[in-house]
Image (cartoon, rainbow, N blue to C red):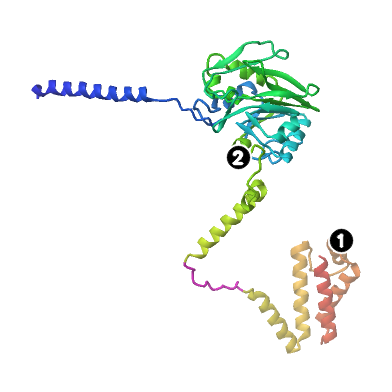
Amino acid sequence: MKKYIPHILIGAVLLAIVVLLITGSNKLNRKLDERVTLQKKDKIPYGLYVAYNELKYFFPGAKVFDNQNEPGYWDSLSAYDSGQAMIIITPQFYPDELELKKLIAFVQNGNDVFISTVLMSNTAEEFFRCRTSILRTGDFISSDGNETDSLRVSLFKPPFNDKRVYTYPGKKLNSWFYQTDSLTTEIIGGDELQRNNFIHLKARAGNLYVHLAPMAFTNYFLLHKNNIRYYENILSLLNPRITKIGWDEYFLRKRYNSDRDQSENNNLLSVMFKYPGLKAALLTALFTLIAYVIMESRRKQRYIPVISKLKNDSLDFVKTIGRLYYDKGDHKNLCKKMGTYFLEHVRNKFKLSTAILGDDFIKNLQYKSGCDEAEIRGIVYFIKYADDAPVISDDELINFHNQLESFYKKV
């Protein structure tokens, strides 16, 4: 066995060298993932994982909600409350006129909206009273035709005291404002050529911020040197007392036509799925139909017979005995039994002695039962009368029965 030990050691060393070479070559062959997703879940260089997760540290008293719905149909934010914020980061911002009106109404109710995009529709530019300038490079946009050129952005004072230029060696994909309304617009940021790329508009009690360099919020940019300060400065513009923050991905996922002015695909199904309530109803109906088909396709069980409830024979027995006495014509005996049942009922329910059916008994029963004294006196009189009368007529029997039924209903 000892003679094989050197061979085993040599083999282990060679195997280790091969593994190191393979893993080392894999590391050398790794390339930067250059996909621009701008999605909060992505940890790749051009995702927004850092920007999204830093919100809870900048606003510890606020809850952060994800949004996939169009303006006015948000699940977590209210269009009528104040103290809220909506953050929209997307390569292209192409809302229709109704969506813009709902965004502006949200701002006017005392909320903040921050939009960072490269390309805006003409409709949005009309609403914001501005004009943007861009050059197209493939599927994305660049200010100078070189999308891989390093991005440089800065913030103006006031409101910022920081004149530092923030940069990173990644993609640019930015644009700038070449025209704004000086009466309604405040310029608060620019690029390396001092071209305006960040503006502030006031709408009643709320604020609207439009930013034209969304790559400044990617993981690559924020983690490069001290660029996180740029993000902190921008978030400091939002109301520090906000209680809800919506992170919007509706405009990021929204489909657009190749034309710059957005015109959504208006087929029947897409229109129906545009509205959350109608979408939920359609999906519910579809799942119900599928469940029905699955359930009905199974082999059906044979018929289960209905088992009737057991009848109460005691009541039938009582009725039979009553008819027997009545048919026999022995009304006196029947009246005595009805009287005996009445006295038993009085003893059990009212705890009264029935040994002496006198005035004291009548008054006590009237007091406890609440029935008329004359009615009780008539029943007691007939019980005594039935004991002494030789014969009881049909009319007397019926009258006695009616007196008892009246008493039982009242008590």
- Residue 383 placed where, x, y %? 82, 76
Name the kind of residue labelled 2 in the image.
Ser
- Say which label, 2 or 1, has the lower sequence index: 2
Marks 2 & 1, CB-CB < 8 Å contact? no
Which one is in front, 9 or 118?
Answer: 118
| Closer mark to the observer between disc 2 and disc 1 | 2
Q: Residue furthest bottom?
A: 328
Query: Within the image, what quadrant is residue 211 found in?
Result: top right
What residue sits right under mark 1 in the picture?
367
Q: Report how far apart the C-alphas of labels 2 and 1 lie in the structure.
A: 94 Å
For disc 2, the neighbor class at 10 Å (few under 14, some 14 to 19, many from 20) is few
Closest to the observer: 360 or 374? 374
Q: Which residue is mark 2?
A: 258
Confirm whether residue 356 shows in the render.
Answer: no
Residue 238 colored magenta? no
Q: Is residue 378 above or below residue 115?
A: below
> Which residue is painted at 64% across and 73% down in the image?
312
Q: Nearer the viewer, residue 42 or 100?
A: 100
Query: Percent position (x, y) of residue 57?
Result: 61, 21
Q: Is residue 279 above or below residue 125?
A: below
Kind of residue at badge 1: Tyr
Label number found at residue 255: none
Can you see residue 227?
yes
Q: Position of residue 135 (x, y in %)?
A: 60, 27
- Range of residues picked out in magenta: 299-310
Q: Main secondary structure of the magenta part?
A: loop
Say which residue appears at 78% left-offset and 80% top-offset.
Answer: 335
Element type at mark 2: loop
In the rendered view of the protein, which quadrant contains the C terminus? bottom right
